[in-house]
Image: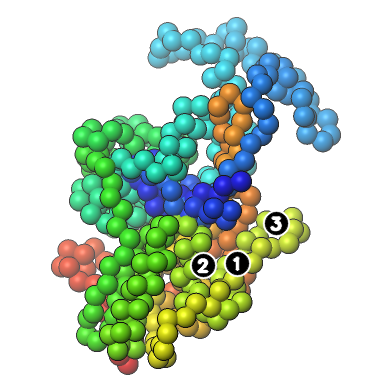
Amino acid sequence: MNNIEKDIAGTTHTPPVVRKKTPLLGYGLAFFFAAAAFFSGMQVGSAGGGETMGLGAIFTNSAPKGEVDMSLFWKVWQTIDTRFVNSTTTDPISDEERMWGAIQGLVSSYGDPYTVFLPPQEASIFESDIAGEFSGVGMEVGMKKGFVTVIAPLEDSPAQKAGVLSGDVLVKVDGVSTERMSVDQAVFKIRGEKGTTVTLTVFREGHEGFKEITITRDVINIPTLKTEEKEGVFIITLFNFSANSESLMQEALRAFVKSGRNKLVIDLRGNPGGYLQSAVGIASYFLPTGKVVVRESFGNGKEEQLHRSTGKELGNRKPFETVVLVDGGSASASEILAGALKEHGVATVIGTPTFGKGSVQELIKLPGESSLKVTIARWLTPNGVSISDGGLKPDIEIEFTKEDREKERDPQMDAAIKHLKE
């Protein structure tokens, strides 16, 4: 069973972790560049063979426990079948499409934005996304307070260059309202071929009215990490938790040790997440062997799965102080790492509350080339706090305002450096 997580990709799903035998940290966070290989909270399974079921058999085979009276469903089906007239088109609706709609209604009744039924076409696109095909606008989206919301645009992506910001609420995609639209449906509409355009209508807190942003899709190159020094402080900016993030972080930490500095900033702002293994591996450079990095809770009295530090070393490393920077674009794997370092007392977290993507999805292949993405677990911090419940709260809250952005100021980084120097 492969686990995949989407937390960093672009126009097709990704930003909320791929988990080869580990959950995807952020499935449902849609990276609008068609990649989706970064969700740390996804598993892939199968719901059986590919035989075709008749419509009646759908509701009689493998029925749930207890009696379920389906007479109302069939009454509505038959009534619409004989009386419905489409007011906008003469194209007929097939029985198969009606069945997909019925299943989507069943799935949506659970009220979980990350539990989604994918008809064949959407299922095919989703699987191509997690296979690593990168073309789109380069941003990740998730559901927040019932609205499709930008988690973060990728560094140097078409979305970032066009002015998309973390926290932008997507009101329309090419003029089509996103009301009642799932994350996956929004991703499906935003993704597209290189060179084509998509127009997003967004609501931005603090601004009047709506803003239209037209973006030209392109091949997305995902940055991973960069380092710099500022005022005697070593800064590591991690853009995502990809398959090679841990090895790059190891190199960066070695450079930090060689620099002779003893003050470190790990900047996770705008980092939508990625592989669970990367988050646990990076945390292991800061935590002793056996310390819990994150808890995976399956609910219903089931035993939690604990993901622990392996206590990795970097040679003769002197004691140092660490600050982790986060914001509303920090999701999934970012929240796991920041939460672990915060609660074990090895880092001070500065910034604004994180996105709050802390659930694990399983991708189940169904007959007829359709799929079901269903939430099966939640991520909890070492102290048992649900990441999905409002995100991670920083130790020191510092806002980053519109005026700061326009004047190219970074009060959060300034606060981190000041905290370390004091």
What is the three-letter code of the residue carrying label 2? Val
**Mark 2 vs 1: CB contact within 8 A:** yes
Residue 297, picture quadrant: bottom right
Q: Position of residue 188 (x, y in %)?
A: 40, 34
Residue 227 drawn at (x, y percent): 27, 72
In this view of the protein, can residue 322 be seen by the observer?
Answer: yes
Residue 343 visible in the shown view: no
Residue depicted at 62% across the width and 40% down the height? 45
Instruction: Report helix, strand or loop for mark 3.
Output: loop
> Is label 1 in a helix, a strand or a loop?
strand
Residue drawn at the location 31% of the way across and 69% of the way down: 237
Residue at the spot of label 1: 307
Q: Residue at x 57, y 56 (%)?
A: 22
Q: N-terminal of the two: label 2 or label 1? A: 2
Q: Which mark is residue 47?
A: none
What distance separates the C-alpha of mark 2 from that of mark 3? 22 Å
Amino acid at the residue labelled 3: Gly
Callout 2: helix, strand or loop? helix
Looking at the image, which is closer to me, 395 or 291?
291
Give the residue number, with chain letter if any, for mark 3: 299
Q: Amino acid at mark 1?
A: His
Q: Earlier in the sequence, mark 3 or mark 1?
A: 3
User: Which class describes the residues within 10 Å of circle 3: few (<14), some (14-19), or many (20+)?
Assistant: few
Q: Residues within 10 Å of mark 2 (few under 14, many from 20)?
A: many
- Whichever of labels 2 and 3 marks the residue nearer the N terminus, that label is 2
Extreme residue toward the left, this view: 407
- Tell me how far mark 3 sits from mark 1, CA to CA: 17 Å
Find residue 47 and report its image quarter. Answer: top right
Quadrant of the rendering where the C terminus is positioned: bottom left
Residue highlighted by disc 2: 280
